[in-house]
Image (cartoon, grey):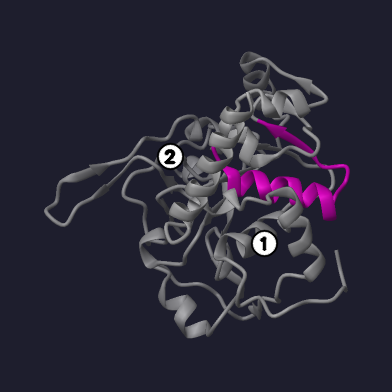
Amino acid sequence: MSGGTTRVDDDVTPATRLCWELARQTRPDDVLIVGVGTPLAATAALLAREVLHPSLTVLFGTAVAPRRIDLAASILDSTAAPRAAIGNYTQVEVLDLVARGGVTLQYVSPIEVDALGNVNASRVRRADGGWRRFPGSLAIADTAALVGRLVAYRVGHQRRFFPERVAFVSGASAVERGRRDATVHGTGAGVTVAVTDSATVRLGERPQLVDYTGTIEHVTAEFGFTVDTTTSRLREPVPTEVLAAIDAIDPLGVRNLEDKDHRSAVLARVSARGDARGSAQ
């Protein structure tokens, strides 16, 4: 999408800005899979299809190409996405599609991502030297090797998200897999790009800062590794028509559940929607 009017987006939430930047990572021929419990990623995927690439295929869990899905309803009702889809896979069929290299893009939100694109969703060291455990990697080790490419994202832009080296490799980058075993093959490139509400960075042997908000000094200070800023540019505001599309896709703002500063307000709205649904039945 190009051109169009823009508005000063000081009142736009970080998650809203992040949705647009994630959407811009898509390609017309992508098959993009998102989890049913990731409303920010789901908003970005549906936004990309709405305003950038109508041919984009979105798998919402096992639901194929759902249309006009109510994201808040999908949180309250697990059948919402399947009912809005043009078809539905079984879980086995989705796993088979991934294994065959049929999924080209997935958004992931790990605890850490390092310069090479290794991701950690498992555990980090506490100040006392012990481990703080997190829910775990689920299928990220497989998706890093099998999905065409992964884009890591995080609301906020902190150094703890971008260490020089992840504390634990839940999903290995293509570079890491090659270093460990030159005979390892896979269709997936792993995490090639990381996006926050303040910056976009290409990862690899020589990480490159693509764009940023604020000052370049502030943004680069939050990386635990050196980034090349030679071709970096200031990030443009979210176009007005894109903001309208986001609000239409996600009117209750469930995308903000991944932002601790907005989570309580979103949960209150979702709860009120659930109470209203219950009273109507």
Q: Give the structural element (helix, strand or loop) at label 1.
A: helix
Q: Amino acid at mark 2?
A: Arg
Instruction: From this view, report whether residue 214 is shown above or below residue 120.
Output: below
Start-end of magenta stretch: 37-60
User: Can the viewer see residue 187?
Assistant: yes
Residue 138 versus residue 226: which sits nearer the camera?
138
Q: Amino acid at mark 1?
A: Glu
What residue lies at 41% left-to-right and 72% top-to-bottom?
Answer: 222
For marks 1 and 2, the one nearer the N-term is 1
Which mark is drawn over residue 21?
Answer: 1
Q: Position of residue 213 (x, y in %)?
A: 58, 78
Q: Give the structural element (helix, strand or loop) at label 2.
A: helix
Farthest residue, direction left: 128
Q: Position of residue 185 (x, y in %)?
A: 59, 32
What residue lies at 51% left-to-right and 72% top-to-bottom?
Answer: 227
Q: Position of residue 223 (x, y in %)?
A: 43, 69
Which mark is drawn over residue 180?
Answer: 2
Q: Is residue 118 left or right of residue 29?
A: left
Residue 14 versus residue 229: which sits nearer the camera?
14
